[in-house]
Image (tube, helix red, strand yellow):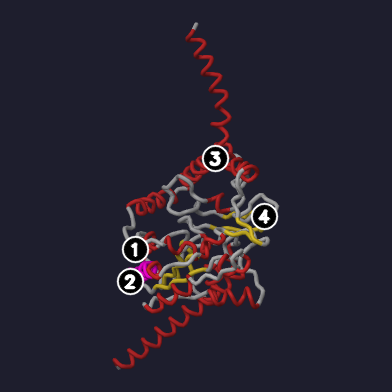
Amino acid sequence: MKKMEVTRLFRKLALLALPFVLWPVIEAVVLPMDTFTFRVWETISVNSVRLLSGPFYPNMHLRMEEEGELAPRTPYAEKKQVEWYTDSYGYRNRDTKAEVLLIGDSNITGAKLSQEETLAEVLEKQLGKEVYSFAPATINRFLGTKRFEENPPQVVVVSSIERRIPELPAVGATGIGNKLRDRTGTIINSSRALTWLAVTADRISKLALYHRTLANIERKFGKKAYIQYQNEFFMEGEQANRTFGDEEIKQLADVLEGYKHALAERGIPFVFMPIPNKENIYHQLLPSGQKPDFLPRLVAELQRRDVKVVDTQGTFEHLYHNEKQKLYPADDGHWNNTAVIAAASLLAQHLQQAADSTELNTRHLVKQLD
C-alpha cells in the first residue's frame, strides 16, 4: 500500500515538474531566438557551451529591434532596428579575412549598432582593406589562436572603453582552454548537425524566460539598474571619472607596452585606441561636472614610451561641445555611429600615415643598397 502511495506521489511530482523541464526545450527548439531577449547580444551570445570557439553562435544572420542595456523595457528605452552577422568562428564579421585586426570589448563588437555601423565595417570602407573584429576578446586570446599564427594580420589595433582599461590583462599564458575551444569549435563548425546541437544546448541553458521574468521583477520592485542624469543614462556615474594616481597610470602603460613587445616578436605593429566613457564626454551632465584627466595622462605616458596611440578624446569633445553631436545613445553607455565614424577616420588616418612612412623607409633603404 505504501509503495503505491509513494509511486503516486512521484507521478504527481513528475507531472508538476514536467512543464519546467519541457519549457527550456520549447524555448530553444520551437520559439524564435529573440522571443525573450532585448538585444541580439543576449540572443546569440554563448552562455555555457564553451566548446564553441567564439563569443557568439557561428554563421548567424539576425535582425532585431533592440533597446539599450541601461534601461530596457522601461519608458526610457530607445528602440533601434539592427542587423547582425557572425562568421564561422562566432565573431561579428561577414567573413574571416583579416588584414587589420581589431581586438576589443563590446564597443568594438558593436553593441546597439547595426552591422554596417560597426567600427570594422566603417574602417574597412575608409581603408580599402579587410578589417576583422576579434571582439569581445583579449590580446592573450589572440596570441593563443592558431589561425592568426598561420595567417597573421598586417597590424593589430587594441581598443577599449575607458572604464575597462584598468582591467586589460598583461601578456601572459594564453591558456589550454582557449586552444581546446578552437579545436572543438572547428569540429562543431564542420557539421551543421553538431552546430545545431551545440547551439540548441546552449539556448536551453540560458533559461531566457526565467531570467527575463526576474529582471522585470527587479525593475519593478527592486533597486533601479541605471544611473540617470538629465535624461541620459550612465554605466558608472561619478565613479567613472575618478582620479588615477601616477603609479596606476604607469602600471597600465606597462601592460600596453607589453602588448607592443609581444606583437613585435611576431613582426606585427601595434596600435592602441582608447574610447572615452560617456561620463567623460558628457561630464557636465553629472552632479559634480568634473572633467576627468585619465585618458590624456595615459596617452601622454604611452607616447613617451613610443607606443602608438590614436587619441579620440579631443575629437569627441569637439563633436559634442562645439558641433552639438550626440556620441552615445541616451539609454546606453556604448558609442553610436557618429562616434564610430569619427574614430574610424582618426584610425584610418593613423594607419595610412604609418603605411606611407614604412613605404618611404623601404624605398630609402633600397636606394641605399643600390
Which quarter shows the C terminus?
Answer: bottom left
Q: Nearer the viewer, residue 352 or 231?
A: 231
Residue holding disc 3: 207
* Corner quadrant of residue 227: bottom right
Which residues make up the magenta segment?
Answer: 250-267
Give the alpha-carbon distance from disc 3 to disc 2, as whole Å.
43 Å
Callout 4, which amino acid? Answer: Ala
Task: Give me the disc on residue 77.
Answer: 4
Q: Inspect this view and state whether residue 82 appears.
A: no
Q: Earlier in the sequence, mark 1 or mark 3?
A: 1
Residue holding disc 2: 261
Q: Residue furthest left?
A: 369
Q: Earlier in the sequence, mark 3 or mark 2?
A: 3
Q: Earlier in the sequence, mark 3 or mark 4?
A: 4
In the drawing, does residue 239 fall left or right of residue 222? left
Label 2: element kind: helix
The residue at the point 58 percent across, 37 percent down is 26
The residue at the point 61 percent across, 63 percent down is 287
Residue holding disc 1: 171
Front position among marks 4 and 2: 4
